[in-house]
Image (tube, rainbow, N blue to C red):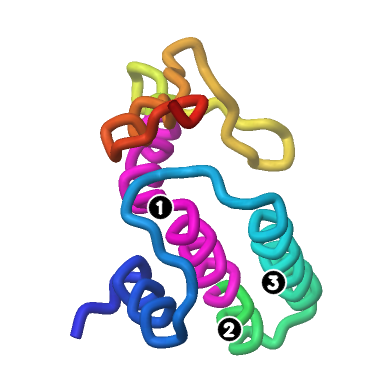
Amino acid sequence: MSSSPARLVREFHRSFGLDARSTPAEVSPELAAHRGELLAEEAAEAAEVAVGGPLDRLAHELADVVYVAYGTALVHGIDLDEVIAEVHRANMSKLGPDGRAVRRADGKVMKGEHYRPPDVSAVLRRQGWTPGGA
């Protein structure tokens, strides 16, 4: 059995009769608001235990964030794996030619002169999205 988050969440949505689109599309404002509330709830729960733990609860809450994020993508018909791959490509372009990253004092990796932002619109268009719903 594959443990791909996309596959597992699709199985959940199908089993429970939840929305699952195969082509990127806008959803009703009500559904969008509901998904936003679910994401905010899960992110808040993860943030609550991020510092104080315990680690097993943090792992659970992080998994819930990912699960709901994949579900939200599925509701919108977004292949989130492809979007993540494009964001990863962009993030890796933060490395300079010397293979080093520029970091802020707190350790955050900064965008260098070789950074190329993600083209998420292109990814969605490849998935069948038409901007503006046309």
Instruction: Compare marks 1 and 2 and give the one earlier in the sequence.
Output: 2
Q: State the predominant SS element of the stretch in magenta.
A: helix
- For the point 72% across and 41% down, the residue is 106
Q: Secondary structure at mark 3?
A: helix
User: Label for residue 42?
Assistant: 3
Q: Which residues are magenta?
A: 63-92
Q: Are marks 1 and 2 in contact (CB under 8 Å)?
A: no
Residue 132: say if magenta: no
Please identify the quadrant where the N terminus is shown: bottom left
- Total number of numbered discs in the rendering: 3
Question: What residue does disc 1 label?
Answer: 77
On screen, residue 27 versus residue 95, left or right, reads right
- For the point 48% across and 75% down, the residue is 18
* Mark 1 to mark 2 CA distance (whole Å): 25 Å
Instruction: Compare marks 2 and 3 and give the one earlier in the sequence.
Output: 3
62 or 108: which is nearer to us?
62
Residue 100 visible in image: no
Amino acid carrying label 2: it is His
* Mark 2 to mark 3 CA distance (whole Å): 10 Å
Residue 51 visible in image: yes
